[in-house]
Image (cartoon, helix red, strand yellow):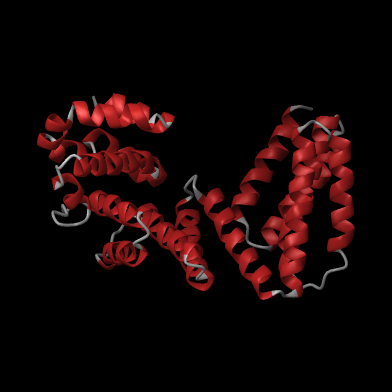
Amino acid sequence: MLRALSVADRAGDHAGFRALCRRHADALDADRDAWLRVPRELRESFRGDMDAMRPFMLTAQRIARELDGLGRPAALRRLAGAEAPGNPLEKIHEAEVLAEDGEFEAADALLRAQLAEGAADDVWVASIHSRLATHAAVRNDLDTAIEHARRAHELVRRRGHWGAARAAEVLDDLLTARELRRGTLHGRHLGACREALTHAQRLSDRALFAESNRALWQLLDELNTYPEESPALRFLGKLCGLTGLNHFHLGDRDAARAWTRRALRECRLRGDRLGEEVYEANLKEIDRRE
């Protein structure tokens, strides 16, 4: 029954979802303690990837709303906090439901309470900061969003967690958005560089490697005119790395190696440990193909 509801929900089959809720309303209401609680077998995987919990939470929320409309409010009352369980994962569940309803202050209060309890796991704490960053960004409080996003990035990077790349992207997006909003020269530079890099990446993805490199070299000429304090210069590592990758696909191993080494130097200069790992691995792959 729950599997069928989940499939219908994720497929966007709203009529089928509602029909299933009506058909099984008695059983769903009677067993709400089971399906509202995060399944034990999923808890460990959720700790490693908190975003994986989102589909589960949203489906549970929608079931509770359907039951409420059918005169069975107990599940929705529990999600609203009337019967909040003590498991930390359940608290995150409750915060996500509140945020989905636009109740960001209440959601943030729950998340901050989890931080105040002094959780020892860096990835768990990072996931909470990540959610606080998202909520602040929705409210257009970019300073607060950046503060939480920076903390989340620091924590996952320190642990060497696979989510460090995504955390870095989120932080960079927020920093760029703030500069663009302020209308500063740095903001304009950041926006232009990100657009140019995205264009070059799309060309490379379409196997237009020479065309991608021409776009990258044009961007490099532009970056060379920026002052040393320009935040846009942090894109040099990615620029050089993509140029090296394009040369690799074009069969020019020497150029690929030279550009990748330059990308590695840029990452080390700017403290981008994740970039260092990527380009060190790329260099090994280039040497292996010799």
Determine whether 178 is above or below 79 in the image. below
Instruction: Specify whether 8 is left or right of 82.
Output: right
Q: Residue 130's image quarter?
A: bottom left
The image shows residue 79 at horizontal and vertical percentages of 22, 51
The one of 13 and 173 positioned closer to us in this rendering:
13
The image shows residue 138 at horizontal and vertical percentages of 48, 62
Instruction: Specify whether 55 is left or right of 25.
Output: right
Does any portion of residue 260 appear in the rendered image? no
Q: Please count the marks in the image.
A: 0
Quadrant of the frame with the N terminus: top left
Instruction: Specify whether 81 is left or right of 290.
Output: left
Determine whether 44 is above or below 270 in the image. above
The one of 120 and 30 positioned closer to us in this rendering:
30
The image shows residue 165 at horizontal and vertical percentages of 56, 49
Q: Residue 48's image quarter?
A: top left
The structure residue drawn at horizontal position 34% and vertical position 67%, both measured from the top left corner, is 105
The structure residue drawn at horizontal position 84% and vertical position 49%, both measured from the top left corner, is 216
Does any portion of residue 21 appear in the rendered image? yes
Determine whether 161 is above or below 137 in the image. above
The structure residue drawn at horizontal position 71% and vertical position 61%, both measured from the top left corner, is 234
The one of 241 and 64 positioned closer to us in this rendering:
64
The one of 103 and 245 positioned closer to us in this rendering:
103
Instruction: Specify whether 224 is left or right of 51.
Output: right
The image shows residue 169 at horizontal and vertical percentages of 59, 54
- Residue farthest to the left? 30
The structure residue drawn at horizontal position 72% and vertical position 29%, both measured from the top left corner, is 288
Quadrant of the frame with the C terminus: top right
